[in-house]
Amino acid sequence: MLRSFDAGYTYSIPFRSLGQICKMRIRMSRSLSRMIGACILAIAFLSMWELYYHMSMNDEATVDVQKQSLNQIRVQPPAKKKTMEEMQKAQSSHLDFMKEQAEIQRNRRRLLDNACADIPPDDEIPMYTKRHIYVVDQYKIAYCFVPKVGCSNWKRILMVLNGDRDSVDGLTSNEVHLHAKMKFLSDYDEDQQEQILKKYHWFFVVREPIKRALSVYRNKFENYEYFLSNKYFHRFGKEIIKKWRKNPSKEALESGANATWPEFVDYLTHPDEREKVEKDTHFSDHWREMYKICSPCTVNYDFIGKLETVQTDAKYLLKTWGVEGKVSYLSSDTSRPTNSSSHATYDKYFGKLGKQELTRLWDLYKPDYALFNYTKPEIIP
């Protein structure tokens, strides 16, 4: 008998019952151990199964990707190699183009030489012309620029060839006109100029003369916002209004803005009055006769381009220089286009001029029409 004391009470537990309790506890401990072991085995099994599942899914995804890649490879056709016939055809097309353009240049040169019979050459290249000729020594290029004949795009090309920029893209008109670093012919000494004259590729570009004059007016004078922001043309506007407008307002005389097309034509066709204002080479070259800018009867140009065929002309010229992969001639959208060559625009403005104004305008630009083989406009009397 075992006595037990608990909270002041005394009770007895038989020895036999105590033994049974111990045996029961032992059996319960063993059962609990087996259950814990079973749980551990179950957890291990589940973990292994989950790992296997994910590995299987990854393998399937990898196989799918590989299948897709293989399918893509199978779908893509092999690069087609040009046949000998195709290469010969491309070469023949290139040669035909170059021959055709060379013939066009010979015809332009021949017509120019014939017309120069009426315009005696200068003893030497005029300084005015030298200050309009950009030189790129690396490519042996000499370019006489004529304002309002796409010269912004040609300056872009020359800036790249001169190493000033990597690409023609993104070059604004202001950048090419104000920040070009090419030298002018006038920057070289006489011996160097003589070598440039003999060994370099000389070119210039022209356009229909009277349409060029209209383009100048619309861009520089009619465009009010541009005129106000461009102080270089204010002196011309003031002189035009002062001389050719009846009863001009004080405001118009002070600003020079809003000169009309007939007033501008009056200014152009009175050289004596122009000389009072045009005392330098800057900006008045926008309307100066093209032959007076580039002196084509004195300089033997290798290439004569025309704005009307500029895309084809530029392609030929760049191929001749071997730089067609380095530069390209951009569209007129990159400059300040006025669309002055359209028939509707042409008729609108020239319909405002009388016979006398039209005749004087023709007389002013007649040499350009003859030298560069342009047809006399029907509107001219």
Image (cartoon, rainbow, N blue to C red):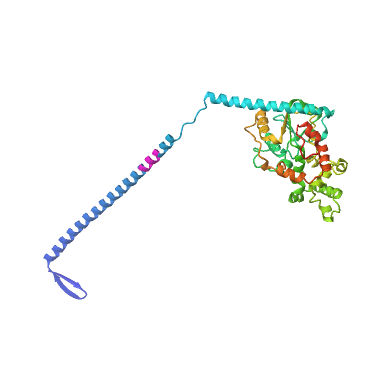
Out of 307 and 299, give the one closest to the viewer: 307
Q: Position of residue 267 (x, y in %)?
A: 84, 44
| Residue 134 quadrant | top right
Q: Is residue 62 magenta?
A: yes
Q: Position of residue 257 (x, y in %)?
A: 79, 51
Residue 359 seen anywhere in this rendered image of the structure: yes
Out of 196 and 88, give the one closest to the viewer: 88
* Quadrant holding the C terminus: top right
Q: Position of residue 170 (x, y in %)?
A: 65, 42
Name which residue lies at 82% across and 30% down: 125
Name which residue lies at 83% across and 43% down: 357
Out of 12 and 238, give the one closest to the viewer: 238
Magenta-drawn segment: 60-67
Q: Is residue 325 left or right of residue 211?
A: left
Q: Is residue 119 magenta?
A: no
Q: Is residue 257 left or right of residue 55?
A: right
Residue 338 seen anywhere in this rendered image of the structure: no
